[in-house]
Amino acid sequence: MVTSRGQNTINNGQQVCIAAIGDVHLRTELPSAIRDGLLELASSADIVILTGDLTENGWLPEVEAVTALTSKIDTPIYAVLGNHDRRSMRRREFRRVLAAGGVTLLDGDSTVLRLDCGIRLGLAGIGGYGGGFWPDEAPGLISTRFSQAVAVRARREAARLDSALEELRDQPRDLTIVTMHYAPTTSTLGDEPMAKHWMLGNSILGRVVDRHAVSLVLHGHAHLGNYCGETPGGTPVRNVALPVVHQPVLLKLGIDGEVKDDPRLRGVHARSTAPATFERSQVG
Ligand SMILES: [Mn+2]
């Protein structure tokens, strides 16, 4: 059990304040508006969540640039790895730098935080993987060696999330947040072309979430996606990739499970109706 170091200046004891951002793809330094925005939000949040692709290439100077920022934050910080972070050739050192910078990596892990306001917050995280979205199990009709390899990895990541959530099952908690890099639903994929959905997430992750009592899922990765969605089972999902939300966001999760979104996000809530085109697509 960990106690929040954050000062709950906004909390009235009935909600968790979460500062979140993903896909900053840091190379050298962040634009000052984003950096200052994160520092400011973090100071009034109970927890900071980074939904992966912290770095562009997984290089050590890049992750050191991330921790130059995170080490200025007193609020507990949790992160998952994105596909760009996984490009790292020095993975152990990458993780060591993150840990030294005050970032707790959730890679098939879970924990329960007791916040200063008294709320017991369950937290589980996984990077996740692609694979695509299917109403039931993955299709058996078109199966190549490549698609089988994707499916194996997708199932393995989903199983690790399932185990992490299973570990929380007997632990008393008021709310549970799951964080991942890849998407557990198409409802936050917005303008991403259908042909790229298989690279952006998979429905197994959504089914795992829906098997457990989860209050909120935060993910990134879908740069052309939209902010607000839900799993097929109705669990609220938010895509906080920087290209979607444009700035770090502050969400409030009520003790009753109600999600109060950052009021600055009006306008990126709705799923866009603009036609998806390949020209505009970019998979993070
Ligand atoms: Mn990305």
Image (cartoon, rainbow, N blue to C red):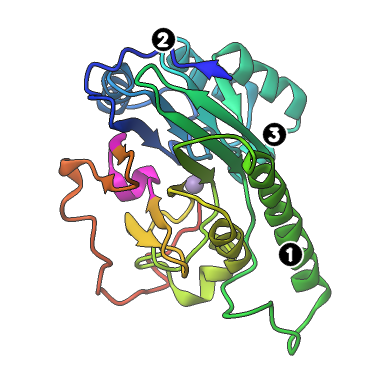
Magenta residues?
239-251
Quarter location, residue 250: top left
Query: Which amino acid type is marked by label 2?
Result: Lys
Residue beneath the point at 45% across and 68% down: 186
Residue 90 showing in the rendered view: no
Give the mark, 2 or 3, whose residue is nearer the N terminus: 2
Which residue is identified by label 3?
88
Q: Amino acid at mark 3?
A: Ser
Residue appearing at x 46%, y 64% in the figure: 231
Q: Position of residue 48 (x, y in %)?
A: 42, 27
At which x and y percent is residue 166?
68, 46
From the image, tell me which residue sits under label 1: 150
Answer whether labels 1 and 3 touch (C-beta < 8 Å). Answer: no
Above or below, 281 against 25 in this view is below
Does 183 lie within the magenta span? no
Quarter where residue 106 is shown: top right
